[in-house]
Structure formats: structure tokens, C-alpha cells
Image: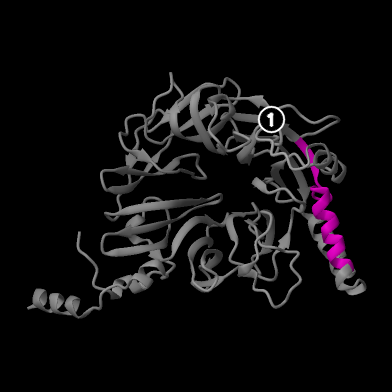
């Protein structure tokens, strides 16, 4: 009788429509606060009115088990917690200089900059300015400053001279240039925001627009200090636990794959004195490295390899995770006996690696204490785990999870060993549980 009743209830569910299918919410990043009691979630969902997909940030707190919309521009992604847990920095290509109140924020798009928002709410504050997109950014471990990478900016005169010399000639390679990593103090960001607020009370709308245009023409962020330059594009970075070094991975300046030598991992000191620092190359292989992250003890760098080979000549394997000793530059492969695909990784506060590993059609969570120890599958639900995130000062973890008959949502668990008791903190895709879906 129970089985017949279940089948009858299932048959009464309406079929999923095409519009409902495209209204599914996807998760692009999950980040857990340092104390493990809050989670910021980056979503990607259809915006039918503006004929695009919008990116938003949401904040969940365990104190009230509530989820609130943190940003509303529709252009916000890649959230990162400050180590003290008071701020969230993120990237947005919203047009902050658009003064037309009749135009929706979701309609406008500009240069990709770093913004700050307090966990207490309020308006987001721009950290970077100028005409150059931010390619990557990272918090200093003292929460007092941010590092960010952009293309090496040109002055207004350099742009004018280039335009006068080449006019309407399209130069394929010569126009491209490498990146610079700069540092800016949070106090400078807040000070500038206060100053701009005072100026808004004194200046007319035209003068305000001119001031912002001047910033765009210089291409630089006021108050920022250049730390190190690279002949390549910087696609990921992280600051060492003691704040003395910045590690970064590079890519082709054109973002077209043209050579393996352009894609490596580097380390540079943050203690700038005099001329710009030169970076020390840490890897030299035939692999495509990305997503660099320091180990908690500051002795090793983790990175992910999408294709290629660290150990030998180029080989197109599945994605893997490595670490490299910063002093000896000796690499170590993690999960060396795992024959599946490692989509991404997270480092726990104790230095252990947490990785979703795909074998066949299932993606489970795995843990590894060191490169020499076994790659241990954690006990959890059957299905697919993704976007796993750890806390710096807590065993709490968050992740996205889905199954054939269960739509993807974000969950939080007390620790990596308590996956079966994890609780959902989102319900964006609840509609899919109310529809008659195909059965696996």
C-alpha cells in the first residue's frame, strides 16, 4: 500500500517546464567564515528581464539560521573572508560610476574591481579603481590590507601616445602586457570612501562624473603600492601565513594557450624596499598550474593541475592536486593512488587536504593528512559533492551536494567526519522536488 501511494503521489506532480529548468540556481563559490559560524555563497541564476545570468552573494549565519541577500548588483562573485571575519571582499564588474538613477544596476557592467562589504550589511565599498580589470586578489593575514593583480596600467599620456602612433591599426601582440601585484591598506580604502562622500555633498553631478573619469584615465588605484610585476597574467594568488610572501600562478597575457613556460608558480616577498621585487619561480614543468594556496605552516604551496604533468613530459591526465616545498622546490603529488578526477581542493586548519573526487558517476569527499598517507573516503551520502569550503579556525565545513532525485543545495557540517548529519542552509532549487522528474 505504501509503494502504491508513493507512486500515486509522484504521478500527481506536474512535469518540469523549460522555463523552470532554466530558473535553476547554480553555486559558483562557497566560503566559510574563519570561526565557522557564517557562510557566504555566490550564486548564478537567470535574469530574464535583462536577458543574462546574474551573480549574487548571500550570507548565512548559524545564530539565526537565516540566509540574506548580501549584494544586489547582479555582477558579484569570488567572495573571500577577511581573516578576522569582519569583512567580505569580492569581485564585481558593476558600473559604479553610473549616476543614472533610472538605470538598473543589473543592466550596467564595467571594469572588474574588488569591493568590500561589512558582515553587518550596508553598501559595498570599492577597493580598486581605474581602467584595468582585477585578475586576482587576496587578503593579508592581518586583515589590514588587500593584494590585487591587474595588467600594468598605462598613464593617460602613454595611452595618447600609443593612439597617436598606431591610430586605428590593430596590433595583435604588442598591445598586451604583463601584470602588477599591488597592496592597499583597508584604512586607506575607508578614508577615501569618506572623502568621496564629503565631495559628493560639495560638487555638482557633472563635477563628480569628471572626478571619476579622471580616475578611469589614470588606470591606477589611489593609495595602492606596487609590490611585484610579472611578464605574464596572474590568475591566482595567496599570502603566506606570516604575511611576508605572496605566491601566485601565471597564465598567458592574451589568455590564449601559446606555451607551457607561461604557466608556472612564483613567490615574491611582500617586504618591499626600493625598486619593485623580482619573483622567484617555484615550478618548472609541463603542467598547467592554478589555484595556489599556502599550507598552514607556510612551508609548502598547494596547487591544482588541470592538464599536463609535473613529474615528466606532457601528459593529458585528469585534474590532480600537488604541493611544492617552497625552499627545495620539490613537488609532491597528493592522492597518487586515486584513479579518478579531483575537481578542486580545500585545506583544513590542521593542514589536511579535503577534496571532492569523482569515480564513475559519483563524487564523494576524500581526506588526506599528508602526501605520504592514504587518500581516505569520508562516510557520507551517495551522490555528488562540490565546492567544499573549510574554516581557518574551526572544523566546520560547507559544501554543495546533489543526487539524482535531490537538487543541488548548500550544506554545513560540524566537521569532515560528520557529513551524514550535515544540514541544508539553502533551498533555492526546492521546486525541483515538487516536479515529476525522470528517474535514474
Name the secondary structure under disc 1: loop
| Residue depicted at x 68% and y 38% | 242
| Residue depicted at x 51% and y 22% | 285
Query: Where, quadrant-wise, is the C terminus in this rendering?
Result: bottom left
| Residue depicted at x 48% and y 27% | 287
User: Would you say 330 lies left or right of 369 here?
Assistant: right
User: Would you say 130 lies left or right of 428 here?
Assistant: right
Give the image quarter of residue 308: top left
Query: Is there any visible trace of residue 270 in the rendered image?
Result: yes
Query: Where, quadrant-wise, is the N terminus in this rendering?
Result: bottom left
Give the image quarter of residue 266: top right
Vertical order, 252 against 33 (above or below): above
How crowded pointer 1 is (Cα within 10 Å; few <14, some 14-19, many 20+) is rated as some
Image coords of residue 252 (percent x, y): 60, 33
Image coords of residue 7 (percent x, y): 13, 75
Image coords of residue 238 (percent x, y): 62, 40
Which residue range is magenta in the image? 207-227
Colour pattern of the rendering: one colour
In the image, farthest residue toward the left: 1
Magenta residue check for 216: yes
Vertical order, 112 against 374 (above or below): below
- Which residue carries the number 1 mark? 231
Q: Nearer the viewer, residue 428 or 134?
A: 134
Amino acid at each position: 500500500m505504501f509503494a502504491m501511494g508513493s507512486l500515486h503521489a509522484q504521478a500527481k506532480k506536474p512535469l518540469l517546464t523549460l522555463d523552470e529548468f532554466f530558473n535553476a540556481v547554480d553555486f559558483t563559490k562557497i566560503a566559510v567564515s574563519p570561526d565557522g559560524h557564517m557562510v557566504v555563497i555566490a550564486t548564478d541564476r537567470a535574469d530574464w528581464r535583462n536577458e543574462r545570468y546574474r551573480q549574487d552573494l548571500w550570507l548565512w549565519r548559524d545564530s539565526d539560521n537565516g540566509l540574506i541577500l548580501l549584494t544586489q548588483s547582479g555582477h558579484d562573485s569570488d567572495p573571500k573572508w577577511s581573516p578576522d571575519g569582519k569583512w567580505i571582499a569580492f569581485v564585481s564588474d558593476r558600473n559604479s560610476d553610473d549616476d543614472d538613477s533610472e538605470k538598473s544596476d543589473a543592466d550596467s557592467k564595467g571594469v572588474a574591481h574588488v569591493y568590500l562589504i561589512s558582515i553587518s550589511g550596508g553598501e559595498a565599498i570599492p577597493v580598486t579603481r581605474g581602467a584595468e580589470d582585477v585578475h586576482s586578489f587576496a587578503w593579508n593575514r592581518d586583515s589590514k590590507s588587500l593584494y590585487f593583480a591587474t595588467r600594468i596600467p598605462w598613464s593617460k599620456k602613454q595611452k595618447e601616445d600609443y593612439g597617436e602612433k598606431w591610430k586605428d591599426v590593430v596590433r595583435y601582440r604588442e598591445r598586451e602586457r604583463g601584470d602588477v601585484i599591488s597592496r592597499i591598506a583597508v584604512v586607506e580604502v575607508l578614508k577615501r570612501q569618506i572623502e568621496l562622500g564629503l565631495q559628493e555633498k560639495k560638487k555638482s553631478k557633472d563635477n563628480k562624473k569628471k572626478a571619476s573619469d579622471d580616475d578611469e584615465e589614470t588606470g591606477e588605484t589611489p593609495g595602492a603600492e606596487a609590490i611585484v610585476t610579472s611578464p605574464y597574467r596572474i590568475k591566482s594568488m595567496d599570502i603566506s601565513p606570516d604575511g611576508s610572501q605572496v605566491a601566485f600562478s601565471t597564465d598567458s597575457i592574451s589568455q590564449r594557450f601559446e606555451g607551457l613556460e607561461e604557466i608556472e608558480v612564483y613567490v615574491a616577498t611582500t617586504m618591499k624596499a626600493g625598486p619593485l621585487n623580482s619573483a622567484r619561480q617555484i615550478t618548472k614543468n609541463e603542467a598547467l598550474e592554478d589555484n595556489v594556496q599556502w599550507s598552514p605552516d607556510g612551508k609548502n604551496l598547494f596547487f591544482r593541475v588541470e592538464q599536463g604533468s609535473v613529474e615528466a613530459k606532457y601528459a593529458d591526465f585528469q585534474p590532480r592536486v600537488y604541493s611544492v616545498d617552497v625552499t627545495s622546490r620539490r613537488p609532491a603529488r597528493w592522492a597518487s593512488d586515486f584513479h579518478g578526477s579531483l575537481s578542486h581542493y580545500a585545506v583544513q586548519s590542521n593542514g589536511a587536504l579535503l577534496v571532492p573526487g569523482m569515480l564513475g558517476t559519483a563524487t564523494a569527499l576524500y581526506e588526506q593528512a599528508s602526501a605520504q598517507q592514504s587518500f581516505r573516503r569520508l562516510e557520507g551520502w551517495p551522490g555528488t559533492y562540490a565546492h567544499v569550503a573549510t574554516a581557518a579556525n574551526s572544523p566546520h565545513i560547507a559544501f554543495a551536494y546533489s543526487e539524482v532525485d535531490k537538487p543541488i543545495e548548500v550544506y554545513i557540517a560540524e566537521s569532515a567526519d560528520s557529513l551524514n548529519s550535515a544540514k541544508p542552509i539553502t533551498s533555492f532549487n526546492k521546486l525541483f522536488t515538487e516536479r515529476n522528474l525522470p528517474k535514474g
